Image (spheres, helix red, strand yellow):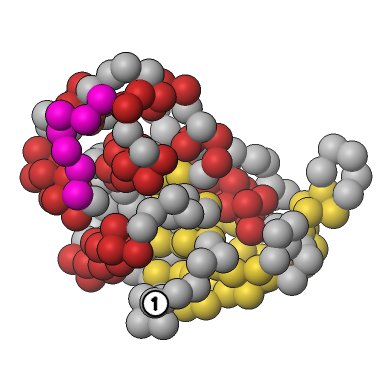
């Protein structure tokens, strides 16, 4: 069983002298140093190709980082296979099941909606989701809202978001970010959010990280 991050305190994120090279020998990241405290809300910005997605995938444990370069809650996310780390990125939102003729109620139940009832109800309200929607018949924005609810019903300790609010309208995005802010203020959790949409974000992050090309 994968180890859990310490439940008694919010996890920190530490990156020390991190460099990463792809299989084709191109450089993805070079000499990254970063320290994010517990309960922080970090906005990760930078041009396309700057390495934001690579960094988030390394933090999530989806890629192997060099030894002793990344610590999430004091653990190595790849070697330890951490419980409590949620990564929502491009491959997640392209899951074909969310375009089939299936009901929202069934989808939310499949990811723990009947167990985390209060969180499900709050997310349904925050994201303005109709439980009677059928996924093949909703708009891209509505589909994205359902996907966010699916990804966030189970309580997480570290949340890594990679450009996943792009289809949300202004109100849905505002409500969603307010929900995330409240999460870090009321639970022991930490967020890193990569985005190029910076409207109305001035008061949201506790930390801002700008990435150049790697």
Q: Main secondary structure of the magenta part?
A: loop
Left or right: 159 as drawn, with respect to 21: left
Is residue 174 visible in the rendered image? The answer is yes
The quadrant in which residue 186 appears is bottom left
For this rendering, which residue is in front, 82 or 123? 123
Left or right: 37 as drawn, with respect to 94: left
Which type of secondary structure does the marked residue at label 1 adopt? Answer: loop
Among all residues in the image, which is located at the extreme top? 101
Task: Examine the rendered structure and indicate whether residue 7 appears above or below residue 96.
Answer: below
Q: Quadrant of the C terminus?
A: bottom right
Residue pictured at 16% horizontal, 38% vertical: 130
For this rendering, which residue is in front, 40 or 105? 105
Q: Quadrant of the N terminus?
A: top left
Magenta includes 69? no
Q: Write down the residue under mark 1.
A: 200
Residue pictured at 58% horizontal, 74% vertical: 209
Residue 101, position as x, y percentages in the image: 32, 17
Residues rendered magenta in the picture: 128-134
Task: Examine the rendered structure and indicate whether residue 162 appears above or below residue 137.
Answer: below
């Amino acid at each position: 069983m994968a180890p859990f991050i310490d439940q008694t305190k919010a996890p920190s994120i530490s990156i020390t002298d991190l460099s990463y090279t792809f299989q084709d020998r191109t450089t993805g990241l070079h000499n990254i140093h970063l320290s994010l405290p517990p309960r922080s809300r970090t906005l990760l910005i930078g041009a396309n190709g700057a390495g934001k997605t690579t960094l988030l995938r390394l933090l999530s444990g989806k890629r192997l980082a060099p030894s002793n370069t990344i610590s999430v809650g004091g653990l190595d996310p790849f070697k330890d296979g951490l419980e409590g780390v949620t990564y929502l990125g491009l491959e997640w939102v392209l899951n074909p099941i969310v375009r089939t003729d299936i009901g929202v109620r069934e989808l939310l139940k499949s990811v723990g909606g009947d167990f985390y009832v209060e969180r499900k109800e709050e997310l349904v309200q925050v994201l303005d989701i109709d439980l009677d929607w059928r996924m093949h018949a909703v708009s891209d924005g509505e589909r994205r809202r359902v996907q966010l609810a699916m990804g966030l019903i189970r309580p997480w300790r570290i949340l890594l978001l990679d450009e996943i609010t792009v289809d949300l309208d202004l109100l849905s995005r505002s409500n969603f970010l307010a929900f995330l802010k409240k999460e870090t203020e009321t639970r022991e959790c930490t967020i890193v959010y990569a985005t190029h949409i910076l409207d109305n974000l001035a008061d949201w992050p506790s930390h801002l990280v700008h990435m150049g090309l790697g």
